[in-house]
Image (cartoon, rainbow, N blue to C red):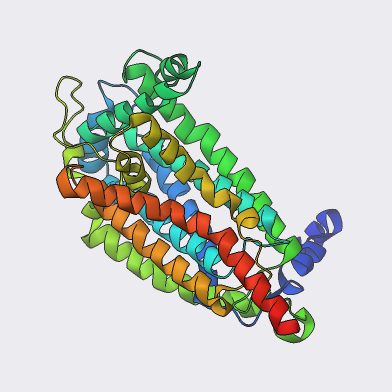
Amino acid sequence: MRFIDWLDERLEIRKLIKVSLTDYKVPKNINFLWSFGMLLVLTFAILFISGLFLLMYYKPDAKLAFDSVNKTIIMDVSYGWLFRHVHAVAASIVFLLMFIHIGRGIYYGSYKSPREIVWITGYILFILFAATAFTGYLLPWGQMSYWAAQTITTLFEKIPFIGPQLVIWLRGDYAVSDPTLTRFFALHVTLLPVLIMIVMGIHLYSVRIVGSNNEDGKPIDKKKEGVPFWPVFMSKEFFVMSVFLLFFFYLVFFKFDFAMDRVNFEPANPLQTPTHIYPEWYFLAFYEVLRGFFFSQNLGLIAFALSMVMILFLPWLDKSPTVSGKNRPLFQIAFWIFVIDVLVLTILGKLPPTGLYAWVGFFAALVFFGFFISLPIIARIEKKQLEGDKK
């Protein structure tokens, strides 16, 4: 008896393959942007495997962490530099893929009914990846990662009633120190990856239940307009993954420094504050929203918190009956202004918040929220237009 027959008798493996792969139909009218979900799964696998290797040599101790990363792994361990570069580049690239994946979802209306659960689980994944990146950024115990952790954890002090105690709990001390490193390490290598895998499973399951959206945003007859996920759709996915891996390993071998701040190659020094503290590039837009309200720290913190959660409420902000942005001229204008604005915020986030930059940052922060405020208005206009066309 073949192994597959033995397995099928006990787990109905053929039925599972049929339901989840060969009988599962994907719309024909989707473009390469729909491949970014699979690229995210691939990049998470790369992060997980390279992280396991780094875990064998990393020391979660404030006195040893910097040398274990920058000397032991990079210089003493065979091919340690390769795993370090792979992990650092993947940690940065995963956010580029995520932003494109989210942008595609917004443009083509993938958050609309009945895909709210897909959207919510996708948002939770974004938050979990952000938490994993934040905790992982401290682990090299470099100068910038130390001060970034010090700055970000200080923000929690402003939470009413529990803020100061929460900061001490997060740090395990009154300032970022050895207990903070140990806590962040534990979260980074255990709890957060497990949560990501669980939520990713729910996310993929919910996509299987309601099906993928498509460019036109209209329900399709999958028997006539769908293609099997396996092997037809996956053959395209393999091609996209191959191109992505060529680009990924080009970065790993030749441009790995884009994912590593030069200041972070200096050991953490609690007595010397860097001239300009900033987070990794994927947090810069949110960081600039915080700094944009430079005249009020409390207002900046509220704006920062809102900027992180507003996207979750898209299914309820945008109630337009038209799903895809392809068929929504007003929405297209708002969407592309939003994309340009996020790029501007990202650039400004790395510049000193002084003079003209401060005011441009304030204006860009207002435009950021303007996109979400405009959605119910655009939806109402589109509803009236559709009702007028029917008459």
Q: Describe residue 263's horizontal placement relative to residue 33 as left or right.
A: left
Q: Position of residue 352 (x, y in %)?
A: 18, 43
Q: Describe residue 298's horizontal placement relative to residue 15 as left or right.
A: left
Q: Is residue 323 above or below residue 167?
A: below
Q: Which is more toward the observer, 199 or 324?
A: 324
Q: Is residue 244 visible?
A: yes
Q: Is residue 226 visible?
A: no
Q: Position of residue 22 (x, y in %)?
A: 73, 73
Residue drawn at (36%, 44%) of the image: 289
Residue drawn at (83%, 59%) of the image: 12
* Quarter that holds the N terminus: bottom right
Q: Position of residue 131 (x, y in %)?
A: 46, 38
Q: Position of residue 300 (x, y in %)?
A: 37, 36
Q: Describe residue 146's horizontal placement relative to residue 41 as left or right.
A: left
Q: Is residue 253 above or below residue 327?
A: above
Q: Which is more toward the observer, 81 or 378?
A: 378
Q: Which is more toward the observer, 286 or 280?
A: 286
Q: Is residue 352 above or below residue 324?
A: above
* Quarter that holds the C terminus: bottom right
Residue 299: name its quadrant: top left
Residue drawn at (27%, 36%) of the image: 69
